[in-house]
Image (cartoon, coloured by chain):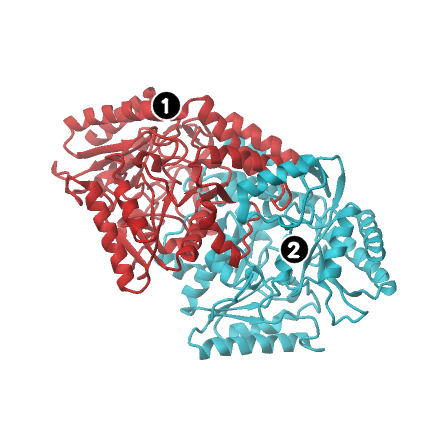
Chain colours: A cyan, B red
Amino acid sequence: MPTDPDILSLNAFDPASGAAADPATAALLARRQANLGPVSVLFYEEPLHVVRATDVWLETQDGRRYLDVYNNVASVGHCHPRVVAAIAEQAATLNVHTRYLNEPTEAYAERLKATLPAALSTLALTCSGSEANDLALRLARTATGRQGIVVTAAAYHGNTAAVSEISPSAFKWGRPPAHVRMVPAPGAGHYGADIAAGFAASVERAIGELDEAGFGCAAFIADSIFSSDGVHADPRGFLKAAATVVRGAGALYIADEVQPGFARTGDAFWGFERHGITPDIVTMGKPMGNGFPVAGLAARPEVMAPYFAEFGYFNTFGGNPVAAAAGLAVLDVIEDQALQRNAADTGRYLRRKLAGLQAGHPSIGAVRGAGLFTGVDLCRDGDPDAPDPQAARRAINGLRQRGVLIGACGRHGETLKIRPPLTFTPDHADQLVRALEEALTG
Amino acid sequence: MPTDPDILSLNAFDPASGAAADPATAALLARRQANLGPVSVLFYEEPLHVVRATDVWLETQDGRRYLDVYNNVASVGHCHPRVVAAIAEQAATLNVHTRYLNEPTEAYAERLKATLPAALSTLALTCSGSEANDLALRLARTATGRQGIVVTAAAYHGNTAAVSEISPSAFKWGRPPAHVRMVPAPGAGHYGADIAAGFAASVERAIGELDEAGFGCAAFIADSIFSSDGVHADPRGFLKAAATVVRGAGALYIADEVQPGFARTGDAFWGFERHGITPDIVTMGKPMGNGFPVAGLAARPEVMAPYFAEFGYFNTFGGNPVAAAAGLAVLDVIEDQALQRNAADTGRYLRRKLAGLQAGHPSIGAVRGAGLFTGVDLCRDGDPDAPDPQAARRAINGLRQRGVLIGACGRHGETLKIRPPLTFTPDHADQLVRALEEALTG
């Protein structure tokens, strides 16, 4: 059940066939290929050459402005002045590792903990969500004495060696190793009407397979919005049954909140809250510093202790005072600009508009989501069960021509991934829906 | 041959016995234990509570100023105004991932490549040196089809799951897995007069063991200043024979330049240059952004290609425009302030002064180093072969009482690790030597 390899290249620039329209971008593209060659991942048939950004807008070198409906790192808006000022001020004052005490790190840790279930009272701060998930796997394996991990079929949990193993969507060929078992994400009729029971049964089966194979199950890890799997948010609470199964088997539930966390889903500050779960470990990253590298995890102290009794762990940049200042400013802005409320309201408005569009466009198979995370399935011949990744590719490029940036996800890349900064307004939503209508008909 | 577990706690705060002298620090310490509990690593019997830093000075909340002779992350000086301004300006303009083209990322890639051997023409940019080494191991394993790695006995290469395995100094108990073989670092009489031949023979033996065990050897990885192993810089060029052995066995030579890179050794911009080696992969991190999280690796394109043919790798924050701006400013400052020359000159001056101190203090067993990276062995009874980690601990705390911050390294933690910002001057060196003399006699 590995991901369709096409998804990796669905909206990727192809050096063999693509080209840049204008000479300035062509020159920069040539430099990029020389500098970052095989590692280089670029979006779009004709890559974008960006020069500045503000709020929900990216500007390219030709002076064109694009509505950003893709980037969740700049979660409180690109270059938010309050976050920029916090970074600049702290960087000019003190920027040192946490083996010395400093006030901003502890102030941030406390603000962050206040958003989390009280039981998860211990934090580890890292630079990236990948580092956080990498550490979470070790905590789970040491705490349980088992090796196996259950993930969803098109999951993505990061880029380290250990975390790549549990990221089926990162495999161009091949598949995860035997100690990693995949379960279908909810949706696409996998689990019929009772998604909660179906999904839990699927997780239970995977745990059984890991037991039989001798690995045992250390943890089930899920991004509760199933970002790479195609955005599956509903019904609220459906994950609780799976969590119960996982705990019943003596394994840990790791909530990867890199995508749904920090008010994104509108209903709650954390994605797992929508499902009524208290995870054993919560990992977080991307939107945490609005672009400053800051990430981490929270866990119960007794989940942390066994690993740290064996290994010394230190993260040089993790949670340093500048990371903390950026993180604090992000929490302030979410609160002061009521961005969780805005995610709920604008997200609902957007999905209503998209549902209206669906009524007149049989190529739209489904509209799903929570808050400002929405997936729109594109399908063939009006059949919601016939995914059409090429239509998604055309829509993404058509939207780009119309000044709107989005991405794709899903097992085959058939789902438009709509995940703007949380300052997105109904006017922005209208612009997106108008452009999508043109792209689908044009 | 695992590291003496004591080294991990040699200069660590012990929550069971330590305490803070002043109430403000005691309160912050209590918060820290509650927030970061088991993960928390703090220096000193009485942790430092820092509030600001500039150049080579850290200031604590009680208004006291400490000479920083330890921190190599703030390599061009704490809170260097040019780096701070570059970060602030770029963060206010554009801070987005590299799947869009942007000028600062390519400008930085080119400036960085210009410092490296031309053959290593492809870069991958990450957030941390750990992420860079984690990726380097995958490149080496995929390119060679082998699993084994050779490291030095007290090496530290980072904190991910994969990289912790090759970091003997991170193990509190136990030892690296069977596919990781350790060789003694040069020094402590391990290799007699011909260090080059002795060390190369040791590496060759380890490769043979990996072959016999069926793992094969993918790579030898070394930090050419042997930072954790106790600082072993000389004789210049001694690593070349080991590199030849490694290549002869079809394995790769990975130069971990997180410690010796970026002008630190004075003799050259990169540590491996002192040894006349062109590595297959160069990894880098800590000083690269003067505290902003930026890191990466350089390799020949053919070393990169096999891995990237199989896996999609993307690093969200890695090499973003703000990271690039910070990195560019650091390179500018190193050049404009002639910091490589200063590292050479001030380092030489410091070691001459320390050698003078050694003449009157039999507890100093040896003084070694290159540029602004110096190790001072403390020994018992005037016997250079009798390491005295407790004397090192006393010296570190004695220096702290006298307003000077340093650390420890070496197999048993017997070596004072002297690694200040590269703006360190002869006056600063004099202050350090005076304080060390008092600490050793006081």
Quadrant in which the N terminus of chain B appears: bottom left
Labels 1 and 2 touching (C-beta < 8 A): no
Q: Residues within 10 Å of mark 2 (few under 14, many from 20)?
A: some
For disc 1, the neighbor class at 10 Å (few under 14, some 14 to 19, many from 20) is: many
Q: Residue extending furthest front?
A: A16
Q: Nearer the viewer, mark 1 or mark 2?
A: 1
Q: Amino acid at mark 1?
A: Asn
Q: Position of residue B297 (x, y in %)?
A: 46, 44
Q: CA distance from mark 1 to mark 2?
A: 50 Å
At mark 1, the secondary structure is helix
Q: What residue lies at 28% left-to-right and 22% top-to-bottom? A: B349
Q: Is residue B192 left or right of residue A326?
A: left
Q: Which residue is label 2 attached to?
A: A269
What secondary structure is marked by label 2?
A: loop
> In the rendering, at what x and y percent does residue A388 appear?
73, 65
Whether labels 1 and 2 belong to a single chain: the reply is no
- Work out which residue is located at the far right of the displayed protein and give it: A360
Q: Nearer the viewer, residue A422 or A151?
A: A151
Quarter of the image where the C terminus of chain B is located: top left
Residue B374 lies, with reference to residue A141, above or below; the image says above
Label 2 chain ID: A
Residue B401 visible in the snapshot: yes
Residue reaching furthest to the top: B427
What's the residue type where badge 2 is placed? Phe
Residue B187 visible in the shown view: no
Residue B152 x, y percent position in the rendering: 28, 49
Residue depicted at x 43% and y 65%: A141
Q: Quick one: A314 or B209, which is closer to the camera?
A: B209
Residue A385: quarter of image: bottom right
The residue carrying mark 1 is: B342
Left or right, A62 with respect to B58, comes to right
A32 over A416 or under it: above or below: above
